[in-house]
Amino acid sequence: MLESRDMLLLATGALPGWLFPPLFVLGLVAISFFASVKGGWSGLAKRYRTSAPRPDLFMKMSTGRMGWTHYNRCLTVGASEAGLYLAMMPSFTPFHPPLLIPWSEIKERRRETSQFQRVETLVIGPDRTVVRIEALVMDGLGRYLPPQRSMT
């Protein structure tokens, strides 16, 4: 049975202080899940999820965009002969597992300017998921990158 004080809190819309931390964590989990699904990460993870260690050549705290999801300074982008490596900060990995995308799966690669920033646009896989990564980051991985190409 609810006490009158609890009913007053519910009626006024105020939440007890102990409820804030679990709601905050639940909100972060929900945001991470929807960002993964709507951005396209979960679709890529079905094909390119990896448990391989991060390649020797990588850059942490990179910025990228996938679909409508903007990953601001939370990506690790790496490259090896096996392909392009993408991973998120550890707090987001439940819905953003590390990816290793073979170079042969990059269908298009082009340099663009997006919102006053130079980006490398990659079209990946049969679903043609569009991934945009800072051009400076991609320049650092240059020795592994396939040549730029655009296909229609």
Image (cartoon, rainbow, N blue to C red):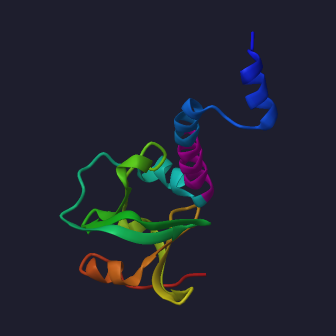
State yes or no: residue 37 in magenta. Answer: yes
Image coordinates for residue 100, horizontal then vertical, percent = 35, 57
* Picture quarter with the N terminus: top right
Residue 13 vertical position relative to residue 93 in the rendered view, above or below: above
Q: Nearer the viewer, residue 117 or 123?
A: 117
Answer left or right for 42 relative to 58: right
Residue extending furthest toward the front:
5
Q: Nearer the viewer, residue 29 or 145?
A: 29
Image coordinates for residue 94, horizontal then vertical, percent = 45, 42
For the magenta stretch, what is the residue range?
26-38
Quarter of the image where one finds residue 101: bottom left
The residue located at (61%, 50%) in the rendering is 34
* Picture quarter with the C terminus: bottom right
Image coordinates for residue 59, horizontal then vertical, percent = 28, 69
Answer left or right for 92 relative to 56: right
Q: Nearer the viewer, residue 40 or 2?
A: 2
Residue 11 vertical position relative to residue 39 in the rendered view, above or below: above
Image coordinates for residue 93, horizontal then vertical, percent = 41, 47
State yes or no: residue 25 in magenta. Answer: no
Residue 86 vertical position relative to residue 27 in the rendered view, above or below: below
The majority secondary structure of the magenta stretch comes to helix
Residue extending furthest toward the top:
1
